[in-house]
Image: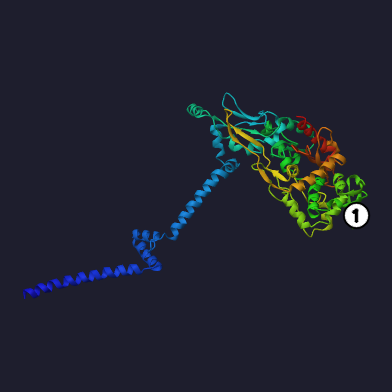
């Protein structure tokens, strides 16, 4: 009986143990058999119960120990953020700082005295002065001579003041001086920018344009340096705040605040024959010089008539003579023979309807609208630079510069270097290519055409024995009953170009007689050095 009782007591223990072992084994097998859906269900249940440990494990690792999708996504997002931040800091930080809507700009000026803007020879064009009471005044030492090029820093920012805002509100004074200023509660002196603007050429262009409305651009074709930029009418940046009401009065506004060099859009007139000639040569590479046209002063095509300037009869014209004499009849007629879709493509290759390679400086894009299927009148007008085609003086200068530089356009730029208040160079800007607009052969052929304009055509006002010039003049109609706009664009010396000059004078007459002599003054100064 005792043994039986003893045996009876032990038997339940054994059964409990075996039952527990079986449950454990069953649980292990069940876990091994679990796959994606089962894991998700269990995780959901665990989450509802508040068991976060198992949820975390199952979200990070699958049964084989592989990283799951959410981990990959986090890594990818982190890397993308890191790449973007690197790109932003290297490429976009200046754009954000220079943005006029960036409210943090004021905090920069609270601790830094805005730096100066200098001409290429070191002449101070704009500087900040401080009186005994600590009041700062931005002073423009040459008034309206550099108004649009340099711009202003009140009522928003324009020109170089806007372009160089990041540098002018940065300071690289030595650490000892910075520490001393911090202790004294004084501001650090901002860095200054040395521009590419040539003091003598800028003053000459300003004087040559006189009281007429228009613009003058001078630049180096092989570097892209802008040497002079003048726009009239202008304003005195020293009295901008006092004059603001009158300058912005629409009833008495002459557009003084508009930089006509970069934002003035005009019909290109006969300067556009550079583009038309290029397209014709592309379509007739071997026989373009065989073109012939008899000009009697007026070209008739059906119900349409195209007149040469003052209805002058040029007589028998080949391609070279038609370009030199700026024969409207000849170029209108050859326009009708061309592939209009290819013509449109060539115009866009020359940056019509496209951004210009000018960073940080406000400008307007030029436009060319004619496409395949255009009517006869549109073709006749467009081929000679009339119709709806519009261009800025800057863009005209860039096309000319590409011709002068063997087909390669160098990016135009206005900042040469940044220097600290102590005179140490902080940053240097170097010439960079803006792309190839045409082949070297095409550029050479256009140079030959433009050379004849000066030697025996409409560009005689810049002809001299001292140096050679290649150019194209233009006389652009824009409104019935009003005087034409005068254009000139060219470079010197023709055989080894060093300077490009483009001139636009509003409502003034012919390009050869009005715009050409202005360009001649700049050529004489530069080539006389």
Q: Quadrant of the N terminus?
A: bottom left
Above or below, 440 relative to 417: below
Answer with left or right where residue 247 lies relative to residue 131: right
Q: How many marks?
A: 1
Tell me how the rendering is colored: rainbow
Residue lying at 79% horizontally and 36% vertically, measured from the top left: 519
Residue lying at 9% horizontally and 74% vertically, measured from the top left: 5
Answer with left or right where residue 279 lies relative to residue 78: right
Percent coordinates x, y for residue 504 in the rendering: 78, 40
Q: Quadrant of the C terminus?
A: top right
Q: Mark 1, residues whose alpha carbon is within 10 Å: few (<14), some, or many (≥20)?
A: few
Of 174 and 132, nearer the camera is 174
Residue lying at 78% horizontally and 53% vertically, measured from the top left: 282
Q: Quadrant of residue 476?
A: top right
Answer with left or right where residue 465 lies relative to residue 256: right
Instruction: Find disc 1 in the rendering and name its residue.
Output: 300
Of 234 and 403, nearer the camera is 403
Q: Can residue 487 be seen here?
A: no
Q: Quadrant of residue 39?
A: bottom left
Q: Can residue 528 be seen here?
A: yes
Percent coordinates x, y for residue 78 in the rendering: 47, 52
Above or below, 195 relative to 372: above
Q: Can you name the residue that lies furthest to the left here? A: 1
Q: Quadrant of residue 517?
A: top right
Percent coordinates x, y for residue 462 in the rendering: 83, 36
Above or below, 77 relative to 472: below
Above or below, 262 relative to 14: above
Label 1, secondary structure: give it: strand
Percent coordinates x, y for residue 429 in the rendering: 62, 37
């Amino acid at each position: 009986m005792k043994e039986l009782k003893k045996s009876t007591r032990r038997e339940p223990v054994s059964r409990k143990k075996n039952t527990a072992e079986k449950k454990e084994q069953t649980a292990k097998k069940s876990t091994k058999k679990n796959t994606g859906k089962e894991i998700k269900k269990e995780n959901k249940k665990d989450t509802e119960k508040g068991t976060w440990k198992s949820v975390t494990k199952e979200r990070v690792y699958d049964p084989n120990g592989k990283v799951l999708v959410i981990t990959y996504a986090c890594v990818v997002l982190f890397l993308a953020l890191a790449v973007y931040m690197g790109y932003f800091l290297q490429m976009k930080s200046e754009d954000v700082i220079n943005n006029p809507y960036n409210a943090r700009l004021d905090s920069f000026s609270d601790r830094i005295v805005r730096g100066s803007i200098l001409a290429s020879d070191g002449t101070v064009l704009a500087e900040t002065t401080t009186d005994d009471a600590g009041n700062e005044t931005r002073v423009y030492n040459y008034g309206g001579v550099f108004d649009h090029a340099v711009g202003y820093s009140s009522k928003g920012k324009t020109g170089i003041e806007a372009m160089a805002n990041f540098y002018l509100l940065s300071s690289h004074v030595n650490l000892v001086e910075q520490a001393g200023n911090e202790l004294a509660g004084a501001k650090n002196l901002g860095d200054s920018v040395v521009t590419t603007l040539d003091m003598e050429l800028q003053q000459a262009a300003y004087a040559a344009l006189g009281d007429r409305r228009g613009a003058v651009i001078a630049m180096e074709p092989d570097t892209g340096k802008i040497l002079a930029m003048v726009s009239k009418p202008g304003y005195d940046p020293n009295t901008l705040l006092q004059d603001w009401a009158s300058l912005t009065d629409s009833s008495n506004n002459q557009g003084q605040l508009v930089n006509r060099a970069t934002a003035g859009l005009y019909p290109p007139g006969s300067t556009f024959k550079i583009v038309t000639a290029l397209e014709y040569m592309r379509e007739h590479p071997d026989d373009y010089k065989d073109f012939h046209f008899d000009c009697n002063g007026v070209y008739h095509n059906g119900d349409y008539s195209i007149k040469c300037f003052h209805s002058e009869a040029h007589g028998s014209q080949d391609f070279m003579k038609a370009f030199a004499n700026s024969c409207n009849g000849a170029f209108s007629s050859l326009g009708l023979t061309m592939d209009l879709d290819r013509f449109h493509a060539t115009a866009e290759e020359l940056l019509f309807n496209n951004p210009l390679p000018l960073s940080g400086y406000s400008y307007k894009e030029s436009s060319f609208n004619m496409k395949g299927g255009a009517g006869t009148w549109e073709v006749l007008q467009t081929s000679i630079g009339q119709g709806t085609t519009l261009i800025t003086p800057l863009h005209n200068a860039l096309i000319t510069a590409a011709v002068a530089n063997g087909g390669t356009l160098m990016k135009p730029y206005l900042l040469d270097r940044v220097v600290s208040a102590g005179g140490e160079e902080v940053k240097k800007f170097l010439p960079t290519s803006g792309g190839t607009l045409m082949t070297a052969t095409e550029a050479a052929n256009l140079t030959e055409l433009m050379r004849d304009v000066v030697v025996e055509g409409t560009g005689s006002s810049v002809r001299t024995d001292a140096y050679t010039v290649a150019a194209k003049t233009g006389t652009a109609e824009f409104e019935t009953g009003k005087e034409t706009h005068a254009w000139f664009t060219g470079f010197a010396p023709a055989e080894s170009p060093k300077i490009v000059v483009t001139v636009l004078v509003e409502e003034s007459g012919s390009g050869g007689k009005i715009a050409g002599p202005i360009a001649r003054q700049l050529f004489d100064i530069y080539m006389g050095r």
